[in-house]
């Protein structure tokens, strides 16, 4: 690794190179070659240091020793290559590369490999390791490790491929025998699309479909909300919005168009939408006429003999009961109409924002609490003389708001003339409006918004207060009669209106889809154009088939690898504590580390194998074999004839040295090797 920037290299070149290396060696599937030169101290190897950081167990690290031919004479790296010194779990492999002279001399690869082989066979320290040294053996070892890694990862890969194959096999089954030009296929597909469309339409209307929208109402649920919540509320306002009803019903019908199978055939989808929409518009006209006919029928005759009509006597009795109720109050148990969370929108403005409370609505009052446990009541508001109006949303507000106000121009809550309540959706607002309707809180009519209407109402109130009691009782009786009959009319309309719409529009459309849609599609024109497949669907079909065959082929290959590939087991762990010694900061060397990791070949090699070759020669006479261990730089030397032996201090037990190199001159050694010492020159 580059330590000092050269030329235009950035100052942090060392860290950039390190980060680049870590991007690769940190991956669990990467095999690390820790390359170190033989003519430098192995204990200072950056490659071994980084490999220890990212691969502490040594399962992915292979040591490679280069420049074995450039070591000083008399030194070798035998014990390192034998994995005795600085051991690695996967050991070391020595290589001899081409020198710059060989490259300049155009020495080819084959000649370089032959020279490398000759070097290991002829070197006395490496000849017994020649079969496990060299570039060809390194290549073989790497190939074997790649094979081992593939075998180790194949089970997980096979499971993943099998799960992918199972996930697409059902969809691919439809494409295996697919022939785009087969006329029978198009006819069959058309019948299936129409039948599926009819089934999905019916399920969405009935609310039994499997594709349920969890975010908003759709299909039959949306129509049901219109019938039982929105319609009664609007009926009380006497401002029935036919456009809104048609719009929401049309939305419910459009929800049916999201049939996934039809997306395969865009022309068929367009034609089906056109035919069904045209039929719905025709039925809409007839339904509207029938609804108006119901209204005209109710207006044509007032049936005062209806069984639900209270009659004059009952009207008087009810009037008396109402007057007694006002004086005595209602002590009976109050029925809860609705509970839920609402946000008070206008009161919290001066206190830091709107607040959410738990509201409880009964027939007598509206109460709100701090939370849904209903322990801490904040306020109770009587519903007498209350009415309801819509409030436009603010510029920055996303909530839907409605307001409660007093018809007698009194404050509703403390100093506020109206109480603004907010909901998250319009559906919640409509549901609360229907609940307030049951509690007797009616919506504000359009005429009540005008000042003229207000003044007339105030005048009517003053007139009512000026009436004598007899006239007031008569007015109350007639009012009860009107309310009773209007209740009958309201009940009839609320009952017949949904039935009419269901019969003339919804059910008729279902019958049309089942019986007549297919005939209309056949009469549209060319069936080939109608059943033309979309480019997106054709591309998806080709991709699915290609992926299916690729997965099948991959699984077959994996099966062959499992039965025909030979793998080797992982080597056993070794004592790599020597790598931890290198973690000591620079400037502080461990006492067990060696400053001179090289070693000279001893005069009498201890128990070398026979394949290693003959020893360099017998030691000179008079050499001592006992006592202190021989000095690495002076193997088997006899006492100096010109003076006393050099004073070389004994060394404690130390960690094995790294790749040998010639020891530098040590200040603790005052003796200089002289040329007259023939025993030292004869190496």
Image (cartoon, helix red, strand yellow):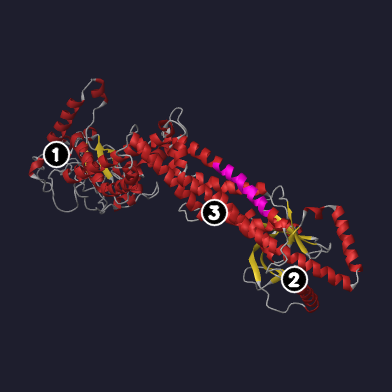
Residue 288 part of the magenta segment: yes
Residue 680 part of the magenta segment: no
Q: Work out whether residue 156 or residue 368 is closer to the camera in this orientation and state it.
A: 368
In this figure, which residue is indicated by the disc labeled 3?
A: 220
Q: Position of residue 152 (x, y in %)?
A: 25, 48
Q: Position of residue 252 (x, y in %)?
A: 56, 49
In this figure, which residue is indicated by the disc labeled 2?
A: 311
Residue 663 shows which numbered tag?
Answer: none
**Which quadrant is the C terminus positioned in?**
top left
Q: Position of residue 79 (x, y in %)?
A: 20, 45
Q: Residue at x 71, y 47 (%)?
A: 395
In this figure, which residue is indicated by the disc labeled 1?
A: 131
Distance (Cα) linking label 3 and label 2 = 39 Å
Asked if the residue at tag 2 contacts the one at tag 1, i.e. Cβ–Cβ closer than 8 Å, the answer is: no
Q: Which residues are magenta?
A: 279-295
Q: Residue at x 44, y 33 (%)?
A: 530
Density class for disc 1 (Cα within 10 Å; few <14, some 14-19, many ≥20) is few
- The reply, left or right, for residue 385 in relation to residue 553 is right
First along the sequence among labels 3 and 2: 3
Secondary structure that dominates the magenta span: helix
Residue farthest to the top? 105
Distance (Cα) linking label 1 and label 2 = 119 Å
Task: Give the mark toward the camera: 1 or 2.
Answer: 2
Q: Is residue 515 visible?
A: yes
Distance (Cα) linking label 3 and label 1 = 82 Å
Helix, strand or loop under label 2: helix
Task: Give the mark toward the camera: 3 or 2.
Answer: 2
**Which quadrant is the N terminus positioned in?**
top left
Q: Residue at x 88, y 73 (%)?
A: 470
Q: Work out whether residue 241 or residue 599 is closer to the camera in this orientation and state it.
A: 241
Task: Give the mark toward the camera: 3 or 1.
Answer: 3
């Amino acid at each position: 690794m580059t330590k000092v920037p050269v030329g235009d290299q950035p100052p942090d070149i060392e860290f950039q190179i390190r980060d680049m290396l870590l991007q690769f060696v940190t991956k669990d599937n990467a095999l690390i070659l820790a390359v170190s030169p033989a003519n430098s101290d192995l204990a200072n190897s950056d490659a071994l240091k980084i490999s220890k950081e990212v691969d502490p167990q040594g399962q992915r690290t292979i040591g490679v020793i280069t420049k074995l031919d450039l070591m000083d004479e008399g030194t070798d790296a035998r014990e390192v290559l034998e994995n005795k010194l600085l051991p690695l779990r996967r050991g070391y492999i020595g290589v001899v590369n081409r020198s710059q002279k060989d490259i300049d001399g155009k020495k080819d690869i084959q000649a370089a490999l032959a020279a490398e082989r000759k070097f290991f066979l002829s070197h006395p320290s490496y000849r017994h390791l020649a079969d496990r040294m060299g570039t060809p053996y390194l290549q073989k070892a790497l190939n074997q490790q790649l094979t081992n890694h593939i075998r180790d990862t194949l089970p997980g890969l096979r499971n993943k491929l099998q799960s992918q194959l199972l996930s697409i096999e059902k969809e691919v089954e439809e494409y295996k025998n697919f022939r785009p030009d087969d006329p029978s296929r198009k006819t069959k597909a058309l019948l299936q699309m129409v039948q599926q469309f009819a089934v999905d339409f019916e399920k969405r209307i009935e609310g039994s479909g499997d594709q349920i929208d969890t975010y908003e109402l759709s299909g039959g649920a949306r129509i049901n909300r219109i019938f039982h919540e929105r319609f009664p509320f609007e009926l009380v306002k006497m401002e029935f919005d036919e456009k809104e009803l048609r719009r929401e019903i049309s939305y419910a019908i459009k929800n049916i168009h999201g049939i996934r199978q039809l997306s395969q055939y865009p022309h068929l989808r367009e034609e089906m939408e056109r035919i069904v929409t045209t039929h719905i518009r025709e039925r809409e006209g007839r339904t509207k006429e029938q609804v108006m006919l119901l209204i005209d029928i109710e207006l044509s005759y007032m049936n005062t003999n209806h069984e639900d009509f209270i009659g004059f006597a009952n009207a008087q009795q009810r009037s008396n009961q109402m007057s007694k109720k006002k004086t005595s109050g209602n002590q009976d148990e109050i029925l809860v109409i609705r509970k839920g969370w609402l946000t008070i929108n206008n009161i919290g403005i001066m206190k830091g924002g709107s607040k959410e409370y738990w509201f409880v609505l009964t027939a007598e009052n509206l109460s709100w609490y701090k939370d849904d446990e209903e322990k801490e009541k904040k306020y109770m508001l009587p519903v007498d003389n209350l009415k309801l109006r819509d409030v436009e949303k603010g510029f920055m507000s996303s909530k839907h708001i409605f307001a409660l106000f007093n018809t007698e121009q009194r404050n509703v809550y403390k100093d506020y003339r109206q109480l603004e309540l907010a909901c998250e959706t319009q559906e919640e607002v409509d549901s609360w409006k229907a609940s307030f309707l049951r509690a007797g809180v009616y919506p504000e009519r359009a005429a009540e918004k005008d000042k003229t209407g207000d003044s007339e109402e105030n005048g009517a109130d003053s007139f009512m207060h000026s009436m004598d009691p007899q006239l007031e009782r008569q007015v109350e009786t007639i009012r009860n009669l009107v309310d009773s009959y209007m209740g009958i009319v309201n009940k009839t309309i609320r009952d017949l209106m949904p039935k009419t719409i269901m019969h003339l529009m919804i059910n008729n459309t279902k019958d049309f889809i089942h019986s007549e849609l297919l005939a209309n599609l056949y009469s549209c024109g060319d069936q080939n154009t109608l059943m033309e497949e979309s480019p997106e669907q054709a591309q998806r079909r080709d991709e699915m088939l290609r992926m299916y065959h690729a997965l099948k082929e991959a699984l077959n290959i994996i099966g062959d690898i499992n039965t025909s590939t030979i793998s080797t087991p992982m080597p056993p762990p070794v004592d790599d504590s020597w790598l931890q010694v290198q973690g000591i900061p620079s400037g502080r060397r461990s006492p067990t580390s060696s400053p001179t990791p090289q070693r000279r070949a001893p005069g009498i090699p201890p128990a070398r194998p026979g394949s290693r070759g003959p020893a360099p020669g017998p030691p000179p006479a008079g050499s001592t074999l006992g006592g202190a261990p021989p000095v690495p730089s002076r193997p088997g030397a006899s006492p100096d004839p010109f003076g006393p032996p050099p004073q070389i201090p004994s060394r404690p037990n130390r960690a094995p040295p790294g790749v040998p190199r010639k020891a530098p001159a040590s200040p603790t050694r005052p003796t200089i090797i002289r040329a007259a010492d023939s025993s030292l020159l004869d190496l």
